[in-house]
Image (cartoon, helix red, strand yellow):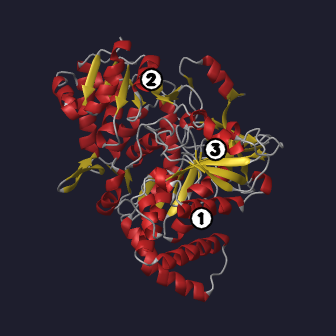
Amino acid sequence: MKQIDMPAVVPADPRANCTDLLVDRLAATPDLVLFSLPSAAGWLPVTTAEFHAQVIALAKGFVAAGIEPGDTIGLICKTRYEWTLIDFAVWFAGAILVPIYETSAPSQIQWNLSDSGATSIIVETADHFSKFDEVHPDLPRIRSVWQIDLNDLDKLVAAGTDVTDAEIERRRSLAVGEDIATLIYTSGSTGKPKGCVLTHSNFVETSRNSGVALREVLVHEDGASTLLFITIAHVFARFIAVLCVHSGVRVGHQADTKQLLPSLGSFKPTFLLAVPRVFEKVYNSAEQKAEAGGKGKIFRAAAALAVEHSQLVEAGATIPLRKKIAFAIYDRLVYSKLRTAMGGNVRYAVSGSAPLGAHLGHFFHSLGIVILEGYGLTESTAPATVNLATKSKIGTVGPPLPGVSVRVDDSGEVSIKGVDIFKEYWQNPQATAEGFEDGWFKTGVLGSFDDDGFLTITGRKKEIIVTAGGKNVAPAALEDPIRSNPLIGQVIVVGDQKPFIAALITLDPEMLPVWLNNNGEDAGLSLAEAAKNPAVLAEVQRAVDSANDRVSRAESIRKFEVLSIELTEADGYLTPKLSIKRNIIMRDFADSVERMYAGSTVTESQPVIRD
């Protein structure tokens, strides 16, 4: 058992609630630009005072509409300014927000609203309303439905003008730290979604302590800023949005990833928040673009030097003169162009939800972008550990945040307790009891601490594969390096109680035509056609071979099957943070898995094509 306790650096205030974060920001910097809204004329500023006034006005609208303290309100909305506006307005009205992913199926919407006892719902679009309307008859408690795209927020504001400031002040002051701030449902990747009760103290104390720990990221000489593009319905972006209000960071929003690069170029953020798949796509897109322009060899050489350069810097080693010269040349030819594509001002990037991989960490580090990889989950209000600007190791998820304790038991399971840990699972005492042991929340992930107190996550306890020969295999050790190949979409390693390890693999539909064109193949091939293409299979084989080189023979992939479809969130195979729902995939593709083992004992790695 190894345990690391990181004391809080900000004294806890059990009376504080989330509204105090905005009230304190208003008192400190009323004229600070806290948000920037996209428009045809550019990014339009919204100051702290303006945001606060809009929050109060919308909170009055909720009160006038009959929202009572303690009421739960559902929200289906993409990443946009109104998300955080609604979040704070609901808190100021004394109510509780229940976020729902915009990609949720009607049955998921029904479960989240019924289980939480929601009395109202806010949807963004007509499509969101249609999905809700399918299950509306099964939700008799829902008495109000508002649609953002129909200007219903403005109508609420107009209807609330008679509500007094004193009433809003009374309501916003009702909640104390231990009271529920929000109810966030898990993705359901391992079963039925559970409602996580996150308290006001979870957000307040985690924000205040993170604000100190991540000061170098959140404070910039010209003003720190970030462009949010991952869904705020997920606790990762939701917490960062709240943290930015607390820290005075300017925030912009861009939910359309196809418009991400132009938005980065005009917004020019100083730090980014992203999942590893985003960094993989940035790297892969740059590589394939260079390949298409006949500069693939230069890019690969530049990437290799970037990784080596970062490794030398991290180790404190002397960099040979010839490598310094080569690095300067590649900086002009390659690295500077990537920095410009990301806005030119990005100094840090916070990465979570899945392992990033040391190769990408070192590559971006040499670009002048420090990726601060961290670990957390809904139950920990997002962050539990994170690399810091002043204390960072690529390949780890960093030390515990202030106010957080992390331990790794003899089986390797990671447990957490501290200011960030949720109160309970909503109306589910059995799951709550099973989730805790002696006050520690059991995360279900496996990891280890190094001598400097940096945590490395090695896999999920429930996902460990035990082969028929008794070999324990962590799928992530194989899946992550294979998925870094630009041609690969998703990887699902299988082999539990089987004679060898195998894998289901999908192709990336965005990168596929680019790769095909760059390799002299027909760029118009469908996924099904590409899954049988010899050149494609050879490239997948190379990715598998490269991953196999990192593990023992008993852990290596002996067969793989390239699926002819894409695994998507809409089809129920991915979570909103793009993690695979392993149990659903294993259920739906059981025939594919069994086909790889039909008549097999142990075989050499070879592709099996699913028709």
**Residue 514 relative to residue 392: left or right:** left
Query: Which residue lies under the disc numbered 3?
Result: 7
Examine the image and state in which quarter residue 114 appears.
Answer: top left
Name the quarter where the C terminus is drawn: top right
Q: Which residue is mark 1?
A: 359
Q: Position of residue 448 (x, y in %)?
A: 73, 49
Which mark lies nearer to you, 2 or 3?
2
Residue at image location 64% in from the left, 18% down from the top? 430
Quick one: label 1 or label 2, which is nearer the N terminus?
2
Question: In this view of the protein, can residue 216 be seen by the observer?
Answer: no
Which percent across, then down, holds residue 183?
47, 27
- Answer whether residue 463 is visible to the viewer in this image: yes
Q: Secondary structure at mark 1?
A: helix
* Amino acid at the residue labelled 1: His
Crowd around label 3: few <14 · some 14–19 · many ≥20 (10 Å): some
Marks 3,1: beta carbons within 8 A? no
Q: Amino acid at mark 2?
A: Asn
Separation of marks 1 and 2 at Cα, in angstroms: 39 Å
Q: CA distance from mark 2 to mark 3?
A: 35 Å
Near-viewer residue (322 or 189): 189
Report the quarter where the N terminus lies.
top right
Q: Say whether marks 1 and 2 touch (CB < 8 Å).
A: no
User: Which callout, 3 or 1, points to the residue nearer the camera?
Assistant: 1
User: In the drawing, what numbered circle is on residue 112?
Assistant: 2
Q: Residue at x 54, y 73 (%)?
A: 303
